[in-house]
Amino acid sequence: QFALQDTGEFEYVGRNGGLCWSPPPGDSAGTFVEFYNTPLDHYFYTAAASEIAAIEAGKVGPGWARTGQSFRGVVFPGCPALWSVAYRFTGMPDVGPSTHVFTIDRRECRKLADNGLWLFEGLPLFAKPVQPDGTCQYSGDVPLHRIWRPFGVSNHRFTTDPAIVAATVARGWVHEGPVMCVLRPPVAPCWRVVDDRGRLPPKLSPARTCPGARPRPAG
């Protein structure tokens, strides 16, 4: 659905019953921090400041710490109709698996909601579908992989890093594939000017050099 102004510009665009003003407001992104519990061998992800504070204050139990890993996603979209909602489920206490999962697949969502083993926790994330070849349609997005531990106490891990996928699978976990496209991490600032030894001028340190930076004679 759409409507045009007299100028020919879109006034709004509607998809799946939703409306978007043109131009829509900007998207609000969040960083989903990865926490790891060593005794449990469990991972957990959240961008909610309240949950992060509770974990770091020990209110959800001992043993949790940041791993240094994270992924970025849209938490408040300017135009919700242009995004797929990501549902968060956790295993039903004392009944379901001891893990959390994110999914944008509505059939999977319905299956989890109806089987009595999972508890729906909310909509913490908006994402884009993965293309059939496992890539993302837009250059600003990157695939988010879901990895499952089928042994011991069930758990899931999420990452955009293929090296982490490989290392986790090597521990016996199962790669369930890329399940959605989230925001690509921002590129850290870097410098292309280095001296003949490949070093940065002192005033620019400790900024890093860009990949492919070419040395040039000092002075």
Image (cartoon, rainbow, N blue to C red):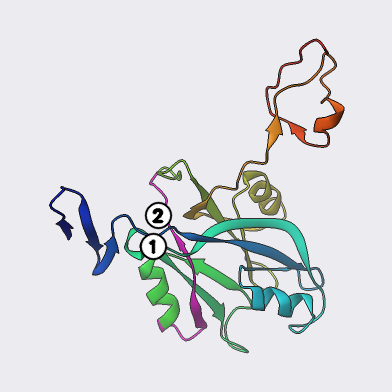
Instruction: For the residues labelled 1 and 2, say whether their Cβ atoms are less than 8 Å apart.
Output: yes
166 or 23, nearer to the observer: 23
From the viewer's perspective, tell me whether residue 162 is left or right of residue 119: right
In the image as oriented, which residue stretches furthest toward the bottom? 94
Residue beneath the point at 68% across and 27% down: 211
Q: According to the image, label 2 marks what residue? A: 129
Residue beneath the point at 23% across and 69% down: 17
Q: According to the image, label 1 marks what residue? A: 84
Tell me: residue 196, above or below residue 46: above
- The question of residue 130 being in magenta is answered with yes
Q: What's drawn in magenta, residue-wise?
A: 114-132
Residue beneath the point at 64% across and 78% down: 98
What is the quadrant of residue 212 in the picture?
top right
Q: CA distance from mark 1 to mark 2?
A: 7 Å
In the image as oriented, which residue stretches furthest toward the top? 217
* Eye-nearest disc, 1 or 2: 1
What is the quadrant of residue 147 in the picture?
bottom right
Label 2: how many Cα within 10 Å (few below 14, some 14–19, many 20+)? many
